[in-house]
Amino acid sequence: MEVIAIHGIDGATTRRIAEQAQANVAMLHYCYDSKEDLFADVYEFVAGRYRDVVKDSDPHSNLVDTACQLLRGVMEFYVESTTFTAAALELISWARRQHGDRGIAVFDQALETVRAVLRSATSEHPVEPETIDQIAYVIGTLSDGFALNWLTYGDRSAATEQMEVAASVLESWLAVRLGSTPVAL
C-alpha cells in the first residue's frame, strides 16, 4: 500500500514493492504471475479494511445515529490512515481504467457492508431498501469527497472542521429524507 501511495500505480514496480515488503523480488515474481495478480490481493486487502472500518464504526443504534457514525468512522480512518487512503483511491481509479470490474468490486463491497449495517439499525418506521441504498450512497459520496480533499490539502485542523460539515450535511439530509428534525451541532 505504501509504495502505491507514494509512487502511484505506474511507479509501484515489483522491485519497489519487494523492497518495501523486505522480500526477494524473485519470490514476488514466483508468487504472482503479473503485477495485476499482485494488485488483486491488494484489492482484497482494501475491501477487507473498508469492511473492518464500517463494522468497527457500527454503534448498534438507530438508523440516523448509525449512518452518522459510519460516516464519521470512515472519515476518521481516512485521516488516520493517509497511506491507505491514497493507495485505495489510486488503486480504484487505476482498476476502473484497466480492469473496470476490480475497482467497481471494491467499491461495491464497501457499499454492501454499509448497507448491511444500515439494515441492521433500529428504526421507528420500516425503511425501504431504496432508502438504505440512498443513505449508503450519500455516506460514500461524502466520505470519498472528504478523502480527496484531505489528500489534497493534508490539513488536520481543517479536516476536523470538514468532518463536522460533512456530518451536518448527512444529518440534515437524513432529517429531510426520513422526516425527522435534525440535531443541532
Image: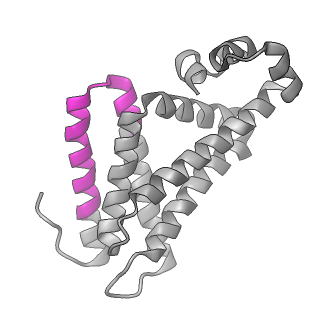
Residue at screen point 28% across, 64% down? 173
Residue 25 place in picture, x, y as percent: 79, 14
Residue at screen point 39% across, 27% down? 151
Above or below, 144 relative to 169: above
Q: Main secondary structure of the magenta part?
A: helix
Above or below, 55 relative to 61: above
Q: Is residue 32 visible?
A: no
Q: Can you name the residue that lies furthest to the left here? A: 184
Residue at screen point 62% across, 33% down? 91
Q: Along the horizontal axis of the image, is 184 left or right of 126?
A: left
Q: Can you name the residue that lies furthest to the bottom here? A: 125
Residue 100 place in picture, x, y as percent: 71, 42
Name the image quarter holding residue 138.
bottom left
In the rendered image, the quadrant that contains the C terminus is bottom left
19 or 170: nearer the viewer: 19
Q: Is residue 117 magenta?
A: no
Residue at screen point 48% across, 27% down? 83
Name the image quarter holding residue 110.
bottom right
In the rendered image, the quadrant that contains the N terminus is top right
Residue 93 place in picture, x, y as percent: 60, 34
Residues shaded magenta:
147-172
Residue 112 place in picture, x, y as percent: 57, 62
58 or 106: nearer the viewer: 58
